[in-house]
Amino acid sequence: MKRFVVTIVTLAILGWFVWAAVVTQDVGRIFRLVRSTRFSFYVPFLVLNASAIALASTNLFLLLLRFKNPPKWKRLFELDLLSLFGAYYTPGGSGGMAFLVYMLNKEGVDPRDSSCCLLLDKLITLFLALCSLFILVLLYVPAGVVALDRTKLMVLAAVITGGLLLSVAVPAVRLKLRSVYVRIAVFRHHPWIVLANVLITTGIFLLSASQFLLAFKALDVHAPDFSRLLVSYGPISIMGYLPFTVSGAGVSEALAIAIWTGPKVGSEEIIAVFVIARLFTLISTFLLPSVIYAGRFGRARLAKLSNSHANRF
């Protein structure tokens, strides 16, 4: 019964966000915008996507160096590519993390060590996202934010921060936080690794914001200032961590409409940009891993031919 109630509440929350973000919009205009997409922009989008994944692999590689049997960077990059579907299309990216822990275990990495590194990486991403939210509230030009004024953004930031602080009062949460702290305490003695992770994650935010800028250009519509795209990417990205949505669907769009809408940027354009960005990402999810399998098949084929040629002589 409890699971049934949780499921109903989850679907109700997600349905509300989808209704607010999509159903209330001019769907016909969104469809026309998507049809006008210039797919030539997919190539630079793919390059930026692959570069962001490479940086994410570098983050995990640096964190795993402090433990036994760290895999090579190339192998981590391959595993990251293979985990894309789980990372993008499961709630909170849990499928991608589970895949990485499983595969790294086969590579000789203790699951506790890999889980610790992945957890710290997520916490750093969350920290930077919250910092981005406060920068958006405190330092961004208030006139540039139309759908949410400065006061409402301050309230939103305060509610999120207050909710996090109040959650600490729950004994189960305190116990979980204590266990998390014990697991990542090893990095207290390696602050340079944590600092490098922060800087690299900032680079991932930069590349990801650039992908949204390319999506706007692919639709040939006016884009918000890049600074606003960059600062708002963090809060939008952590919507994918919410358990009641897959890859932040519906929730991310609703928040982006609230932040990006302006005199030259309408909600329909923003929805269309998300549709294209998600379409490009879906294609990359299958295209990039296929490169791995093609490369492995090619190397195996060449090795077989070489052995066959050597045996003849």
Image: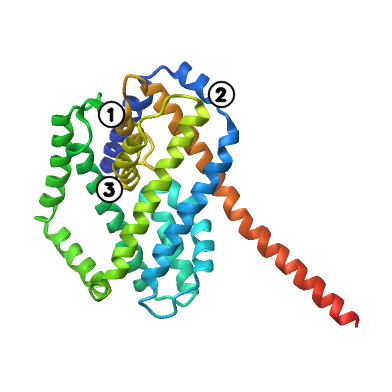
Q: Which of 183 and 280 is in front in this view?
A: 280
Q: Mark 1 points at which residue?
A: 258
Name the amino acid, label 3.
Answer: Ala
- What residue is disc 3 on? 129
Per the rendering, the mark at residue 35 is 2
> Could you tell whether 213 is left or right of 301 in the image?
left
Q: Residue at x 9, y 55 (%)?
A: 169
* Amino acid marked by disc 1: Ala
Which quadrant would the C terminus be assigned to in this image? bottom right
Kind of element beneath mark 1: helix
Mark 3 or mark 2, which has the lower sequence index?
A: 2
Q: Is the Cβ of the residue at disc 2 closer than 8 Å to that at disc 1?
A: no
Q: Where is residue 276 drawn, in percent x and y?
A: 49, 33
61 sits to left or right of 180: right
Which secondary structure lies at badge 2? helix
- Using a 10 Å C-alpha cutoff, classify the residue at mark 3 as few (fewer than 14 neighbours), some (14 to 19) or many (20 or more): many
Specify whether residue 60 is in view.
yes
- Which residue is the extreme one toward the right? 313
Residue at horizontal 55 percent and vertical 42 percent from the top: 44
Please name whichever residue, 240 or 2, is drawn nearer the observer in this view of the structure: 240
User: Tag on residue 49?
Assistant: none
Q: How far apart are the two marked residues, 3 and 1, measured between alpha carbons? A: 17 Å
What's the CA distance linking mark 3 and mark 2? 32 Å
Q: Tell which circle, 2 or 1, labels the residue nearer the N-terminal end.
A: 2
The kind of secondary structure element at disc 3 is: helix
Q: Position of residue 13 (x, y in %)?
A: 28, 34
* Amino acid at the residue labelled 2: Arg
**Residue 176 point in image, percent of width and height:** 20, 63
Percent of width and height locating residue 97: 40, 59
